[in-house]
Structure formats: C-alpha cells, structure tokens
Amino acid sequence: MADTSPIGIHDLSFATTEYVLAHTALAQHNGTDVAKYHKGIGQRSMSVPAADEDIVTMGAAAAAPLLERHGSENIRTVIFATESSIDQAKSAGIYVHSLLGMGSATRVVELKQACYGATAALQFAIGLVRRDPAQRVLVVAADVSKYELDSPGEATQGAAAVAMLVGAEPALVRIEEPSGVFTADVMDFWRPNYREAALVDGQESITAYLLAAEGCWKDYTEQGGRPLEEFTAFCYHQPFTKMAYKAHRHLLNHCGHGVDEDRVARDLGLTTAYNNVIGNSYTASVYLALAALLDQADDLSGQAVGLLSYGSGSVAEFFAGTVVPGYRAHLRTAAHRAAIDRREPVDHARYRALHERSFPTDGEEHRTPAETTGPFRLAGIRGHKRVYETRAQRPPRHSQIPR
Ligand code: CAA
C-alpha cells in the first residue's frame, strides 16, 4: 500500500534585492498616469538587483536561514528553478550549494519551464521524499524579471528568490494530491538564448494564463480535487497582482459562481502584499503569495489553500495545501518584512544604468562594484567564470525550533 504520510513545505524563506524602484518614478519618467500602475496592474514598486546580485546571490540568501535552522545533513537534493539562468550548462544550484557549504553527497539540478519551474521542483521533491521520508529536499526558486526599457512589460519587472525545505511531517503546509495540470504550446512570452530581456505579447499572455487556469482547474476537478468552496484562500502566480484578480474572477465565472467582489477580496486579499512591492519574480511569485498569506492571516490551521502556478509557453498546475496546526511558530514574518524594508530606493537614472549593465564577453577579468549589503555577492567574472563570495561570515546557528 502506498505511504500516505503528509509531505510538504517544512520551512520557507525569501530574499530580494538591494534596490527598489517606485512606480511613481517610472510613471514620472514615461508620462504614464501612476494610477495605471497602482490600480490598473496593482503594482507599487519593483525590486532592482545591484550590480553584484543575481539569481545565485538571492537564492543563497533565501536558503541560508533554512540551513541555519535545520542543518543540511538530511538534504540530499537541491533543485534550483529559474528562467533567468546564468549558464546554459551548469546549474545555478551548484553555486548555492557551494556558498552554503553543503556536503558533496548531494544531487543538484536546475529546472526550467518559465514561471512554473518551482512548482515542478516542489512536486519532484515530494516524489523524492515519498521514496525516502528521512530525506529533505531544498527547492530554490530565483528569478530576475527583465523586459526592454520603455516597453509595456517594463512596469512588471522585479526580482526575488524563495527557498523551501520539503520534507515529511512538514511544519507549514501539507501538499495534497491530486494536482490538476495543463500544457498548451503558445508563444505568449519567451526568451531566446541570445537575449537578456524577455519577449512578450502582453495581451496574448493574459489570455493564455486564463485559458491555462481554466484548463488545470478542469483537470483538478476531474482528478477528484476539492470543490472551490472548500478553499479559504487562493495563491496565484502574480506577474502583476491584478492578474490574480483576473484569474480568480475567471475561475469563479467558469465554475458558475458569479463574481462576488467581497468574496474575491477575501480569497486573495492577503496574498498580494509581497508581490505588489517586489514585482514579478517569475518562479518565486506564487510562493511569495503563499508567504504573504501565511505571514498575515490570523490563523489558517487546518485550512485548505489553493495554489495556481502558471508558466508561459505554457504549463499550469492547480493543487491544494493544508496549513499545519502550529505553523505560526515557524514563520519568518519579521525577516520577510525586513527583506522588503531594507531595500534602498533608486532614482530612474540609476535603475536604467543597472538595467543596461552586462558583463563584457571577452573572457577578461571584470570586477563588479561592491553594492549589495546581502550575505553573498557576485564579485565579478574571470575567464568566463562567475566568481561569488560570502560577504558576512555567519556562524552556523541552530534555533530552538524542532527540526
Ligand atoms: N487608471 C487606472 N487603471 C488604468 C489606467 C488609469 N489611468 N490606465 C490603464 N489602466 C488599466 C487598464 O484598464 C488595464 O486594466 P484591465 O486589464 O483590467 O482592463 C490595466 O491598467 C493595464 O493597462 P493596459 O492593458 O493598457 O497596459 P499595457 O498594455 O501597457 O500593459 C501588460 C499591461 C500587458 C500586463 C504589460 O505590462 C506586459 O506585457 N507585461 C508582461 C507580461 C505579463 O506580465 N503577462 C501576464 C500573464 S503571463 C505570465 O503570467 C507569465 C509571466 O510571469 C510573464
């Protein structure tokens, strides 16, 4: 008989960038009514990486607190999900594994399917833990969302990393079966290997997201999933926070519920607080929505939360998580708020300069200016190799919270 002991998210931590650009500054620069950003797309500001930050420095910064609390002895797999990869061959996870001083008896791999990658990583991690419940898997989702300057997508940039420790008898959220899945071959958003900024057909991408949401929900119900009424809240992938509202209204209509705006606000209201000031963090986005919900809700013990993960191109998955009684003792709410509040506002000129920055491809040594105050930095590139360093040496610390 199959083992049905609960598996899920045991701990979750996120990190974002050194800098932040307010949408008021963007609106002032391009002559847009700021209400389009604040109300129209539901965004207030976006995280901007410093010259010495990238998916690896953010991913390691997100994961370090998990290892400090739980140690790394039981982690035999690290899965790094990203769509802003820094190398076509080597996994960004190996740099993180090294920066965190993890043991060599670990498998490390990078996964990609646009913003959906982290959910694939979570599901694969659950499969590994199901095979050996003594093991834990470190899932890191990190992305820098980048569109062309002065393009419509520019207002939906951002950057962040979420790290999740996946294991048996989790302290935060049990991931349930079944999942509803959906794939369709569409060109709504893509990034050829030779480009740094993504290409996107904005309106097509919104339509594709809604179709995928409907498709994975349909599969979820056909697989015997919960009815809509059983969910206390819904965490959607949030390329901009208003997209979650569009998707939820679409789902309610599709299920014949009609759209009661009070209900929509109740279902989504607490899930957008981090994404509306961080911006799109691609793979990390739906898990930032989960973090915002867990950090802010009064008490969700025993309640079901729906998660809808969408990655352009496109793949979507709907699944449920049950919040574990006692979870609040394990949250990192203060650290999460600090990660957002510590960002230094930059003006538009500085943001543009950072946006246009890239390493020369000549194989010479190019050092980055020391900007980040985070725990890890990208020191530069030498002989086509990225060089990372630890800024502040943190002594290994195990908290009182049971492992
Ligand atoms: N006051 C209030 N609201 C205003 C306004 C004003 N002055 N001016 C415009 N608005 C509203 C519009 O009515 C619109 O709202 P609705 O969609 O509810 O009608 C909203 O603001 C946006 O306006 P536009 O549609 O005119 O905006 P746009 O064409 O300039 O760009 C965008 C919007 C398509 C999302 C663009 O930012 C974009 O291309 N972003 C990148 C793609 C993206 O995020 N797609 C989401 C789905 S794909 C996905 O989820 C994967 C992923 O992460 C990329």
Image (tube, grey):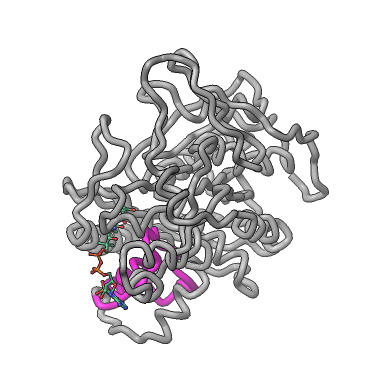
Asked if the stretch drawn in magenta spans residue 237, the answer is yes
Left or right: where 402 falls relative to 276:
right
**Residue 104's image quarter?**
top right
Q: Position of residue 96 (x, y in %)?
A: 57, 30
Q: Give me the residue at 55% from left, 30% from top.
A: 378
Q: Give me the residue at 32% from left, 37% from top.
A: 196
Indicate whether 117 appears above or below 364: below
Question: Which quadrant of the picture is home to ligand 1?
Answer: bottom left
Q: Which residues are magenta?
A: 228-253
**How many circles with numbers are drawn on the protein?**
0
Q: Nearer the viewer, residue 339 or 34?
A: 34
Main SS category, magenta section: helix
Indicate whether 275 appears above or below 107: below
Q: Give me the residue at 36% from left, 21% from top.
A: 361
Q: Position of residue 360 (x, y in %)?
A: 39, 24
Asked if the stretch drawn in magenta spans residue 188, the answer is no
Q: Position of residue 385 (x, y in %)?
A: 47, 18
Q: Nearer the viewer, residue 136 or 369?
A: 369
Q: Quadrant of the C terminus?
A: top right
Is residue 5 shown to the viewer in this render?
Answer: no
